[in-house]
Image (cartoon, rainbow, N blue to C red):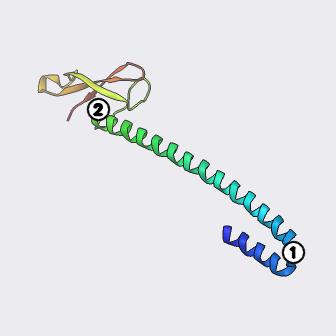
Amino acid sequence: MLETLLNKVEALINERGSAVVLREHLALLRARIGQLERENADLRAQAQQAQVHVEQQGDQLRRFSQDNPEGWCCDACGSVDIKRTGSRPDPTFGRLGVKQAAMTCRPCGAVSYFTLD
């Protein structure tokens, strides 16, 4: 884009040959370059913020996968941000040695139970 602007300025200079025209177009070019540099700085800042957000989301995802590798959801609110806090015998098959994991939801505090394989 910058090269296109410079080519246009050069074409105008060649056509007109005026120092006044050259000065005016160079002033316009400088203004446009300044605007593009500000936009570039803004975009770099936005990209940096996005990178921080991505890293935070990655940390949260790693925590979820460690605390809740099965991807179970809270029965009360549906969140996957749950952590195993214990276990109990399965109400139906407990006599056969089947257990349920007690998972506590971080957002709402509800405890949900899931049958272990």
- Of callouts 2 and 1, the N-terminal one: 1
Q: Nearer the viewer, residue 112 or 56?
A: 56
* Residue 101 drawn at (x, y percent): 24, 26
> Picture quarter containing residue 31?
bottom right
- Residue linked to disc 2: 67
Q: Nearer the viewer, mark 2 or mark 1?
A: 1
Residue where numbered disc 1 is placed: 18
**What residue occupies the far front of the structure in this picture?**
19
Which residue of the protein is positioned furthest toward the bottom in this rendering?
14
Residue drawn at the location 82% of the way across and 66% of the way down: 23
Outermost residue toward the left? Answer: 96
Q: Is residue 25 left or right of residue 67?
A: right
Q: Is residue 64 left or right of residue 20?
A: left
Can you give x and y, in whole percent of width and height, for residue 71 in the image?
33, 37
Quadrant housing residue 11: bottom right
The answer to whether residue 71 is seen in the rendering is no
Nearest the eye: 84 or 92: 84
Q: Position of residue 44 (x, y in %)?
A: 55, 50
Relative height, residue 70 to residue 23 (above, below):
above
Q: Which mark is residue 26?
A: none
Check the image and report above or below for 40 versus 96.
below
| Kind of residue indicated by mark 1 | Ser
Q: Which corner quadrant holds the N terminus?
A: bottom right
Give, as a three-letter code, the residue at label 2: Asp
Q: CA distance from mark 2 to mark 1?
A: 73 Å
Question: Which corner quadrant holds the C terminus?
Answer: top left
Residue 112 % position (x, y)? 33, 23
- Name the residue rendered at 33%, 39% in the picture: 62
Is 58 rendered above or below residue 83?
Answer: below
- Residue depicted at x 16% and y 28%: 98
In contact (CB < 8 Å): disc 2 and disc 1: no
108 vs 66, left or right, is right
